[in-house]
Image (spheres, rainbow, N blue to C red):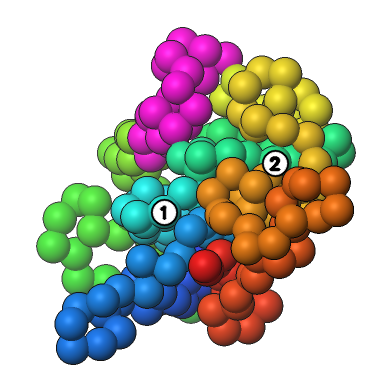
């Protein structure tokens, strides 16, 4: 089981992508792949979000997997945490999970006043009028502010498209659910952002029951789900996959 915990950044994205690719890489000279044994990937998300590019990287990698993905949300799976969950085949959340927060913001500090107070000066060599946009010792011009606002709008629109495509909702509906709004797990189920209410155990049971084949039966004739192993790829912060 892979727990995506904490802020989503480039380091986490690289680690997760590497583990996923290793799981489906050829394992012998006959090009037989691990993916022939993997039946499902379960992703436990406990994250308030993070970097937009890192979230997009993880989202694309999960969509490219040759097996279903089931998401189990922890106490919080919001913003980038929801971004990476949106395309899952099934999403589980607890009643009090905090999710949604479909929105984008950016912070750019202006330290020119502080620098002037202590007599700190700089002599930047700019190659264009927007070159100092993200330099905290360069005052923000109107053109710089407009450029940042346009970039945020593009990322926000892409976020809404990811949710619209993943959850099969039209853009107008997504816009009403977005705007940075926070939803509880129960609210999210009612509005179509998650599929079922339940914790990690229920998500694991669903994945086993739906995508795996048990090799033994219980006394009442039902499949023995405990007979289906969960194999961990690495440590607790990596992904778990189901194998035959």
Q: Residues within 10 Å of mark 2 (few under 14, many from 20)?
A: many
Instruction: From this view, report whether residue 87 is shown above or below residue 41.
Output: above
Residue 216, percent across and down?
Answer: 69, 61
Q: Is residue 164 magenta?
A: yes
Cα separation between marks 2 and 1: 18 Å
Percent position of residue 18, x then y: 39, 76
Q: Is residue 148 left or right of residue 75?
A: left
Residue 116 picture location, percent across and down? 52, 68
Mark 2 — residue? 92
Name the quadrant containing residue 30. Answer: bottom left
Please give the name of the residue rendered at 36% of the width and 56% of the height, measured from the top-left corner.
65
**Which image quarter holds the N terminus?**
bottom right
What residue is shown with label 1? 67
Magenta: predominant secondary structure element?
helix
Q: Report the front residue among 104 and 149.
A: 104
Outermost residue to the top = 172
- Residue range highlighted in magenta: 155-176
Element carrying mark 2: strand
- Residue 50 in the figure: left or right of residue 230: left
Residue 181's place in the image compared with 190, above or below, is below
Indicate left or right for 37 with 225 as reference.
left
Q: Earlier in the sequence, mark 2 or mark 1?
A: 1
Residue nearest the viewer, comparing 133 with 223: 223
């Amino acid at each position: 089981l892979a727990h995506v915990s904490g802020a989503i950044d480039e380091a986490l994205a690289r680690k997760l992508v590497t583990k996923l690719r290793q799981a489906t890489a050829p394992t012998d000279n006959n090009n037989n792949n691990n993916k022939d044994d993997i039946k499902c990937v379960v992703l436990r998300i406990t994250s308030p979000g993070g970097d937009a590019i890192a979230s997009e990287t993880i989202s694309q990698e999960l969509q490219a997997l040759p097996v279903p993905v089931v998401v189990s949300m922890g106490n919080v799976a919001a913003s980038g945490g929801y971004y990476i969950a949106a395309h899952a085949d099934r999403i589980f959340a607890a009643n009090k999970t905090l999710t949604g927060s479909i929105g984008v913001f950016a912070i750019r500090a202006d330290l020119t006043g502080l620098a002037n107070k202590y007599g700190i000066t700089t002599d930047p060599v700019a190659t264009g009028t927007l070159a100092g946009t993200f330099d905290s010792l360069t005052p923000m011009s109107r053109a710089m502010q407009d450029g940042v606002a346009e970039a945020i709008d593009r990322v926000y629109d892409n976020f809404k498209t990811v949710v619209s495509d993943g959850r099969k909702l039209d853009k107008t509906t997504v816009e009403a659910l977005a705007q940075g709004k926070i939803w509880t797990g129960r609210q999210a189920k009612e509005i179509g952002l998650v599929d079922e209410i339940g914790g990690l155990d229920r998500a694991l049971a669903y994945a086993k029951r739906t995508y795996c084949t048990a090799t033994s039966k219980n006394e009442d004739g039902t499949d023995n789900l405990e007979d289906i192993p969960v194999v961990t790829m690495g440590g607790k912060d990596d992904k778990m996959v189901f194998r035959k």
